[in-house]
């Protein structure tokens, strides 16, 4: 029997609307309404905590990180929602993985520069011993 959270069996986009949006849900969209939604704030923190790991990972592992974040949201009862015709529908795992990968990529240039600088300082401090 396969688990609902088996990465090989992605949740398809929803056809039934979600009646109530909760703080476990991530709401797609732009503007302060979605940015300030409690579920989106939690999701952005989870993404932020994984950005360094994502920056130093292989392409294969980057997808695993995105899938793990989506799985964490879903295991807590959350959905990845998009509004259509004043109703919310789940976007499915594939789009959620894509959106999460995009969120993880934001700011990667700065993160890599900072990591390189930290490594250079560490090497310099070791050579002066």
Image: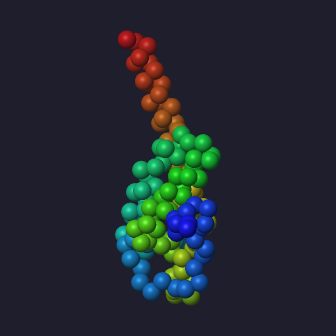
Is residue 64 among what the camera can see? yes
For this view, does 47 lie left or right of residue 102? left
Residue 105 position, x and y percent, is 56, 51
Query: Considering depth in this image, is 61 or 128 the residue closer to the camera?
Result: 61
Q: Classify 69 as above or below 85.
A: above
**In the figure, 49 relative to 124: above or below?**
below
Residue 51 spot, x, y in % from top left: 48, 48
* Residue 70 position within the rendered picture, expressed as x and y whole percent measured from the top left: 50, 62
Q: Residue at x 57, y 49 (%)?
A: 62
- Picture coordinates of residue 41 (x, y %)? 39, 64
The reply to whether residue 36 is visible in this rendering is no
Q: Nearer the viewer, residue 104 or 68?
A: 68
Quadrant (top left, top right, bottom left, bottom right) of the N terminus: bottom right
Report the quarter where the C terminus lies.
top left
Q: Would you place residue 11 above or below residue 64 in this image?
A: below
Quadrant of the image occupied by residue 20: bottom left
Please give the name of the residue rendered at 42% of the width and 24% of the height, measured from the top-left corner.
Answer: 122
| Relative depth, front residue between 21 and 92 | 92
**Residue projecting furthest to the top:** 129
**Residue drawn at point x = 50 percent, y = 57 percent:** 68
Q: Residue at x 47, y 28 (%)?
A: 119
């Amino acid at each position: 029997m396969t688990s609902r959270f088996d990465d090989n069996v992605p949740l398809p986009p929803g056809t039934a609307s979600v009646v109530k949006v909760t703080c476990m849900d991530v709401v797609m969209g732009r503007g302060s309404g979605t940015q300030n939604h409690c579920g989106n704030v939690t999701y952005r923190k989870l993404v932020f905590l994984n950005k360094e790991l994502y920056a130093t990972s292989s392409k294969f592992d980057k997808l695993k990180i995105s899938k793990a974040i989506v799985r964490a949201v879903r295991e807590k009862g959350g959905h990845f929602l998009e509004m259509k015709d004043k109703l919310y529908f789940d976007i499915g795992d594939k789009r959620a993985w894509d959106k999460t990968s995009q969120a993880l990529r934001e700011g990667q240039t700065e993160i890599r520069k900072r990591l390189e600088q930290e490594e250079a300082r560490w090497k310099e401090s070791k050579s002066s011993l």
